[in-house]
């Protein structure tokens, strides 16, 4: 069994939905012990699908331990502050107001543990909107993504919550950098990752591009993506209704495609260069649609492979994990939770899957952690009786049966 780089490190997560749980998911995969501190009602994602956990909870919370605490009680706060004394890192994405109300700001926890690295994933970092609230779609709307993604002309959010996940990944990078610092200052141990600032950084290529075009052309204009700039680059439907995404980036790609599919346009010298193909975009697009649309999926892929063209099928979610590449050893972790079985993609880069914990039931590790913190049986019983903490019960967060 390999030695994970964060083995022996304790991370406290107070997270809900995606951003903070995604960050601690990565830290857990790197070997950290992650204690998921939840309210007695549990993380919101425990009860989003028929009264039970959503895919978000299953995918990003396996390998963690659950400690259920009521932080609105004095005894609950006592438990949490004793836990903070033992931790290396705290990561959360609670609202700024909730953080202050519960007494778990960076200043509060520094009194318990001066060495603690404190990471707050929030709507905005420093600036006029510092205490404002932002969610994934707010970040998309405020940083140009939503304006570029319209459905029937209406600005719309992307499907997946990529800004939440990017923010979680950025949090991990900052935490790891601080852990590598032999003598971080108090300021360096306090990390803020804003969803808005995450969105700005993700959009930096496009923001720089529109400035470039404005100065060159005297008007704002987007730098077109590949699908809009290069004819033949995009998704095309086969005769039997499946979709193939073609990677036609260069003149050589176009030559291989047009010849490999025996397109009449292969002999048109005017289309040999990208500039002319752009000028005749509609003609080229129609030609590629006809060529792919006249073939079955199997026939099209055979011709594309023979021609050396880069392509892939556009897969619906229910078929993604059927792909041989996805099933290759080291890619998927098999989990059992709530009587159901799941294949969950593993954090990439390792190539080996070591045994780990399934997603925790709410409060599953409460007593174990209390004992580690020095609470004896009597103290644990009192905490439970006062509802300052809770333990797992079989009735917690189960899926309603299908009718």
Image: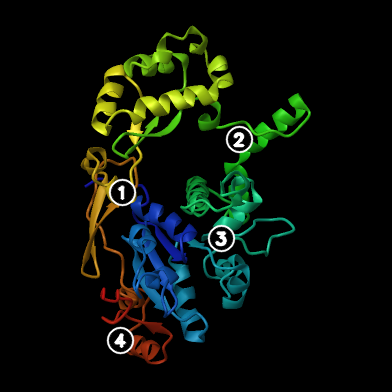
Distance of mark 3 from mark 2, alpha carbons?
Answer: 26 Å
Query: How far across and how far down the image is residue 52, in percent?
Result: 34, 72
Distance of mark 4 from mark 3, alpha carbons?
Answer: 34 Å
- Front: mark 1 or 2: 2
- Front: mark 3 or 2: 2
Residue 247 occupies which quadrant of the picture? top left
Query: How far across and how far down the image is residue 40, in percent?
Result: 42, 80
Tags 1 and 2 in contact by the CB under 8 Å rule? no
Distance of mark 1 from mark 3, alpha carbons?
Answer: 25 Å
Tags 1 and 3 in contact by the CB under 8 Å rule? no
Q: Of marks 4 and 3, which one's residue comes earlier in the chain?
A: 3
Q: Is residue 247 visible?
A: no
Is 33 placed left or right of 85 in the picture?
A: left
Query: How far across and how far down the image is residue 217, in percent?
Result: 75, 26
Query: Foreground residue, 16 or 186?
Result: 16
Residue 36 occupies which quadrant of the picture? bottom left
User: Compared to 313, does 338 lie above or below?
Assistant: below
The numbered mark at residue 377 is 4
Tell me the element at label 1: loop
Tell me the element at label 2: helix
Q: Which residue is mark 3?
A: 120
Tags 4 and 1 in contact by the CB under 8 Å rule? no
Label 2 packing within 10 angstroms: few (<14), some (14-19), many (20+): few
Is 245 placed left or right of 213 in the picture?
A: left
Q: Of marks 1 and 2, which one's residue comes earlier in the chain?
A: 2
The numbered mark at residue 205 is 2
Q: Of marks 3 and 2, which one's residue comes earlier in the chain?
A: 3
Distance of mark 4 from mark 2, alpha carbons?
Answer: 57 Å
- Front: mark 1 or 3: 1
């Amino acid at each position: 069994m390999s030695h994970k780089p964060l083995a022996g490190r304790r991370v406290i997560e107070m997270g809900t939905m995606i951003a903070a749980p995604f960050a601690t998911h990565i830290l857990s995969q790197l070997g950290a012990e992650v204690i998921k501190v939840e309210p007695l009602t549990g993380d919101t994602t425990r009860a989003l699908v028929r009264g039970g956990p959503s895919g978000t909870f299953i995918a990003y919370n396996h390998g963690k331990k659950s400690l259920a605490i009521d932080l609105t009680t004095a005894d609950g706060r006592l438990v949490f502050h004793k836990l903070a004394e033992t931790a290396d890192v705290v990561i959360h994405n609670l609202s700024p107001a909730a953080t202050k109300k519960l007494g778990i700001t960076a200043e509060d926890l520094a009194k318990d543990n001066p060495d603690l690295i404190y990471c707050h994933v929030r709507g905005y970092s420093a600036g006029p909107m510092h205490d404002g609230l932002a969610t994934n779609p707010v970040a998309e709307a405020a940083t140009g993504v939503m304006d570029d993604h319209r459905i029937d002309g209406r600005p719309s959010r992307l499907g997946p919550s990529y800004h939440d996940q990017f923010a979680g990944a950025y949090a991990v990078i900052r935490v790891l950098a601080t852990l590598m610092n032999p003598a971080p200052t108090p300021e360096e141990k306090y990390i803020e990752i804003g969803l808005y600032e995450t969105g700005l950084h993700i959009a930096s290529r496009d923001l720089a591009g529109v400035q470039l075009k404005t100065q060159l052309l005297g008007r704002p204009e987007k730098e077109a993506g590949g699908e809009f700039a290069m004819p033949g680059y995009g998704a095309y439907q086969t005769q039997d209704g499946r979709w193939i995404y073609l990677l036609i980036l260069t003149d050589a790609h176009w030559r291989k495609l047009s010849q490999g599919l025996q397109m009449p346009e292969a002999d048109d010298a005017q289309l040999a260069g990208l500039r002319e193909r752009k000028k005749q975009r509609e003609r080229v697009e129609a030609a590629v649609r006809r060529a792919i649309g006249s073939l079955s999926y199997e026939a099209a892929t055979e011709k594309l492979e023979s021609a050396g063209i880069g392509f892939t099928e556009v897969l619906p979610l229910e078929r993604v994990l059927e792909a041989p590449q996805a099933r290759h050893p080291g890619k998927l972790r098999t989990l059992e939770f709530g009587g159901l079985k799941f294949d969950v993609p593993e954090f990439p880069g390792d190539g080996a899957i070591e045994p780990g914990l399934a997603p925790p039931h709410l409060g599953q590790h409460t007593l174990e952690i209390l004992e580690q913190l020095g609470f004896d049986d009597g103290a644990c019983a009192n905490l439970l009786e006062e509802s300052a903490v809770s333990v797992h019960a079989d009735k917690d967060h189960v899926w309603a049966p299908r009718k």
